[in-house]
Image (tube, rainbow, N blue to C red):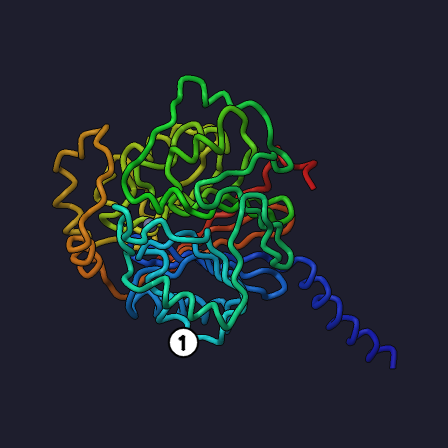
């Protein structure tokens, strides 16, 4: 009897322990310069930020990480904005998984094709999306809102070109990086500036993800005071294009680790790498792809890169001169976008995984080479809630 009791204890104890220390897991999907990342909370709730590009390729890859994560459904879908590399996969994804109960977005599109506005990047998307969310709950997010996902404090800091006016806990200090900075207006792709931006807190871990938010809205958010404070992880805005990630944003939030959702020829600009590497406290830059724009000088060591082009192809460009600094990001035409997306398709595609413990310790791993690195909890937030 006593033996039985002890055996029961031995089984129960590790189970109880496991429950209290279950990690938050984040899977960053390779969508070839688009965006899709899956957040799985310790209680098994799921939130997907964006759905990658149109067609089956990116949807296959999202379903693949859902399998790897052992989850069958998406509880919350957050669309940062309506560009094709973010919402393109939605119509395919909803055919493959159980109905998604909650949708979040920034509200009406600025790409309505009326009064000189740009047309929708995914033709017919708004109509298709309305049909999809008509059977679910849809929330238009405002700065300051919360997404009620269990175990995380998910705060919205930007939406539809507006930003929070009240600092989050740990934020509110004057931002010295604003001195001498000015608001850089970006006329390209106005929907980027509409992006839903989130600050996500899990125990002592804090991450920021602003979709494709451009530097003009970063300036509105971060100057003169920093409402966010510092973070452990930054999901680099707009794939690392140089019309985002201004020093007044990056050098104020001081991420220790950044995740770059770039493509071989999308984002990952030299100026962005420069801002990241010169940011106080930066430790590592994890990339979804080796990026041609950044070349040998700025790309991270291969250990930190999930997908690497054919080495011979890379070798050919290593001796080519880098793109001149200061060249502004010009969005490619739809035709060249489609051509690039097709050329970029490769199998297999690898993801980056982040596993976070409630005490703030986190591990990033590369599914291509199984390299992983563990980061200690942030010291500066030891007394934070
Ligand atoms: Zn994008």
Report the residue that reaches farthest toward the front.
115
Q: Position of residue 136 (x, y in %)?
A: 52, 70
Q: Position of residue 306 (x, y in %)?
A: 34, 54
Report the residue that reaches farthest toward the right.
1
Residue at mark 1: 96
Up-down relation of residue 176 to residue 142 (above or below): above
| Residue at screen point 54% across, 43% down | 143
Residue situated in front as seen by the camera: 378 or 1 = 378
Res. 222 in view: yes
Location of residue 144 by image quarter: top right
Report the residue that reaches farthest toward the top.
180
| Residue at screen point 56% across, 23% down | 174
Where is the N terminus found, in terms of image quarters? bottom right
Residue situated in front as seen by the camera: 1 or 56 = 56
Residue situated in front as seen by the camera: 68 or 302 = 68
Q: Position of residue 171 (x, y in %)?
A: 60, 32
Mark 1 lies on a secondary structure that is helix
Q: Position of residue 314 (x, y in %)?
A: 18, 47
Is 216 on the left-hand or right-hand side of 355? left
| Residue at screen point 30% across, 70% down | 56
Up-down relation of residue 244 to residue 12 (above or below): above
Report the residue that reaches farthest toward the bottom.
1
Count the labels in the image. Answer: 1
Res. 70 in view: no
Residue situated in front as seen by the camera: 130 or 296 = 130
Whether disc 1's CB lies below 8 Å from ligand 1 is answered: no
Label 1, residues with CA under 10 Å away: few <14, some 14-19, many ≥20: few
Where is the C terminus found, in terms of image quarters? top right
């Amino acid at each position: 009897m006593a033996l039985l009791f002890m055996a029961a204890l031995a089984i129960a104890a590790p189970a109880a322990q496991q429950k209290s220390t279950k990690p938050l897991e984040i899977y960053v999907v390779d969508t070839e310069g688009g965006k899709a990342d899956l957040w799985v909370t310790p209680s098994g709730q799921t939130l997907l930020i964006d759905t990658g590009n149109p067609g089956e390729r990116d949807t296959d890859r999202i379903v693949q990480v859902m399998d790897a994560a052992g989850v069958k459904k998406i509880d919350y879908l957050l669309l940062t904005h309506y560009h094709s590399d973010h919402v393109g996969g939605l119509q395919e994804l909803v055919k493959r998984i159980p109905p998604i109960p909650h949708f979040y977005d920034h509200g009406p599109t600025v790409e309505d094709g009326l009064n000189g506005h740009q047309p929708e990047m995914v033709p017919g998307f708004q109509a298709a999306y309305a049909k999809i969310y008509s059977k679910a709950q849809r929330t238009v997010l405002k700065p300051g809102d919360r997404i009620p996902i269990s175990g995380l404090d998910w705060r919205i800091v930007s939406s539809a070109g507006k930003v929070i006016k009240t600092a989050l806990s740990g934020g509110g200090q004057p931002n010295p990086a604003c001195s001498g900075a000015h608001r850089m207006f970006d006329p390209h792709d106005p929907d980027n500036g509409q992006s839903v931006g989130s600050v996500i807190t899990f125990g002592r871990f804090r991450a920021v993800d602003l979709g494709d938010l451009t530097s003009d809205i970063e300036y509105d958010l971060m100057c003169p005071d920093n409402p966010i404070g510092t973070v452990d992880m930054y999901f680099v805005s707009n794939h690392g294009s140089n019309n985002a990630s201004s020093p007044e944003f990056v050098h104020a939030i001081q991420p220790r680790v950044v995740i770059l959702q770039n493509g071989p020829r999308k984002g990952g600009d030299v100026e962005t790498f420069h801002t990241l590497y010169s940011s106080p406290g930066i430790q590592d830059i994890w990339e979804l792809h080796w990026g041609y724009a950044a070349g040998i000088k700025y790309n991270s060591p291969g250990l930190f890169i999930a997908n690497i082009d054919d080495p011979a192809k890379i070798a050919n460009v290593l001796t080519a001169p880098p793109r001149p600094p200061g060249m502004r990001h010009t969005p490619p035409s739809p035709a060249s976008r489609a051509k690039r997306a097709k050329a970029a398709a490769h199998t297999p595609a690898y993801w980056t995984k982040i596993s976070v413990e409630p005490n703030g310790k986190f591990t990033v791993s590369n599914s291509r080479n199984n390299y992983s690195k563990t980061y200690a909890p942030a010291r500066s937030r030891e007394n934070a809630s």
